[in-house]
Structure formats: C-alpha cells, structure tokens
Amino acid sequence: MNEKKVYAKLLAGRRELGGYVKYVFQDLNTGKYILCTKFPNWNSEPIKLGTIGYLRYEKISAGELYSIRNDCVPYKYTIDKFISFEREEKRNSIIFI
C-alpha cells in the first residue's frame, strides 16, 4: 500500500450504496484528477465543493490483503482509498512598511 499527500481541490462528491462516498479531487500541483473512495466507517467532517487543502489517500491494488476479524481478505478492485482531508486555513496577510 502506498500513502500519498497532495495539495488538492474538491471538485465533486457522491454518496454510494452502503455508505461509501466517492470524491473527485484535482491535484493543484500537477492538474491530475484523483477519484477517492471514503469507506462507510470513516468518521470525518463533510467537505464543501471547491475546498482547497491537503488530501491524504492510499493507493490499493486489487489482490492486496486486508485484515477482517481474524482473516485476510483480498481487495477486489484497485482504488485510491480516502484517508483524510486537511482544509487550508486562510490567513490574512498584512505587510508593514
């Protein structure tokens, strides 16, 4: 598994069956789009469209194993798993001359 952190903007979000949420972010450094899946048991505040901040996500390949109860189960799909989003705080810049 490969965790990444990028400076991004939220472009879209949609709740799926089972409580999953799909987010589309744009990496503001490269211009690339990232489709992330937030799992239903993830507790995080809702993100407003257009919010800019730091997205943490994990690339998961189909077949990688994860633990559930006392068993290891392979992921069925390759996904970018949402971990967190830290909003950029707007600061007022004051220049003293």
Image (cartoon, rainbow, N blue to C red):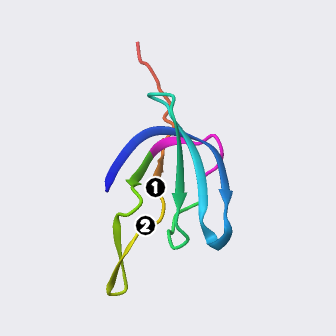
Tell me whether the residue at label 2 lies in contact with that at label 1, contact meaning CB atoms closer than 8 angstroms.
yes
14 vs 55, left or right, is: right
Residue 46 in view (yes/no):
no
Task: Give the residues in magenta.
Answer: 46-54
Q: Which residue is mark 2?
A: 75
Vertical relation: 48 (above or below) 74: above
Q: Residue at x 53, y 58 (%)?
A: 37
Query: Dot 2: few (<14), some (14–19), or many (≥20) neighbours within 10 Å?
Result: some
Q: Which residue is mark 1?
A: 78
The residue type indicated by label 1 comes to Thr
Q: Residue at x 39, y 52 (%)?
A: 59
Instruction: Please state which of residues 41 and 77 is positioned toward the viewer in this rendering.
Output: 77
Query: Dot 1: few (<14), some (14–19), or many (≥20) neighbours within 10 Å?
Result: few
The residue type indicated by label 2 comes to Tyr
Instruction: Please state which of residues 34 and 86 is positioned toward the viewer in this rendering.
Output: 34
Magenta stretch holds residue 49: yes
Instruction: Please give the label number shown on residue 56.
Output: none
43 vs 1, left or right, is: right
Residue 35 percent coordinates (x, y):
55, 47
Instruction: Please state which of residues 21 and 68 is positioned toward the viewer in this rendering.
Output: 68
